[in-house]
Image: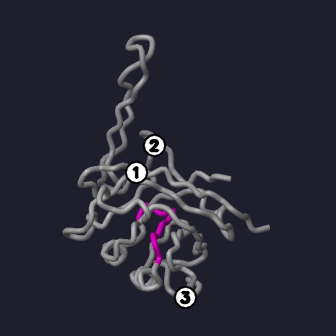
Amino acid sequence: MIIDLSLSISENTPVYPDDPPVSVKLWAVIDRDGYYMNVLKMGEHSGTHVDAPAHFVPGGKTIDEMPLEKFIGAGIVLDVREGEGPVGLDEIPDGGYFGKMVLFLTGGRELSPEVALFLVAEGAKAVGTDSMSIGDEAVHKILLSAEVPVFENLVNLEVLIGAEFTFAAFPLRIEGGSGSPVRAVAIVQRELE
């Protein structure tokens, strides 16, 4: 089973404050032009997206320089919706994060720098969240300096709690990009009863 973890791209797609709005405009219609096409205008970090190191790290890799292996792997969802304020270390179970795509179901919370440092030390392959932002500038810099991709605006994570799944979310090959919209999915191998 494949679960879509992505927001739809439309003019109603929420964007981070001061980011450019999403625009989807009709360009051609079959009756007039013989084909159908829209024009998209949006920032690299619109909708469900991934941040590349260059987004916060001077001289960091751009999205087109990141190895494709960084965007697919065994996933795990951590449900931290019950807490308040930034997600702390006391909310994170010990171990088991090496090489994993660690996804946080936060209900709008952000990660603390301590959690970001812990995930880097544990060898997490990537980190994602259902929030518009994984955390403050320090959190971004900790993860991205270690070339741990950051996925934001994920949806449907609640259906993956306790499931065994592969997470995949490939970026567009934007030359010099600081990030990219993605179509994030979970390929579920086994669901918990």
Q: Is residue 13 above or below residue 133?
A: above
**Residue 66 point in image, percent of width and height:** 34, 62
What main secondary structure does the magenta stretch of the protein show? loop
Q: Nearer the viewer, residue 92 or 15?
A: 92
Badge 2 or badge 1: first in the primary sequence: 2
Three-letter amino acid code at the position of disc 1: Pro
Could you tell me which quadrant the C terminus lies in? bottom right
Residue stretch rendered in magenta on the structure: 124-133
**Residue 118 point in image, percent of width and height:** 45, 85
- Mark 3–mark 1 Cα distance, whole angstroms, equals 32 Å
Tell me the crowding category of disc 3: few under 14, some 14 to 19, or many 20 or more residues within 10 angstroms, Cα based.
Answer: few
**Residue 14 point in image, percent of width and height:** 43, 50
Considering the numbered disc 2 on the image, is that residue within a helix, a strand or a loop?
Answer: loop
Tell me the crowding category of disc 2: few under 14, some 14 to 19, or many 20 or more residues within 10 angstroms, Cα based.
Answer: some
Extreme residue toward the top, this view: 32
Badge 3 or badge 1: first in the primary sequence: 3
- Mark 3–mark 2 Cα distance, whole angstroms, equals 36 Å
| Residue at numbered disc 2 | 9
Three-letter amino acid code at the position of disc 3: Asp
| Residue at numbered disc 3 | 90
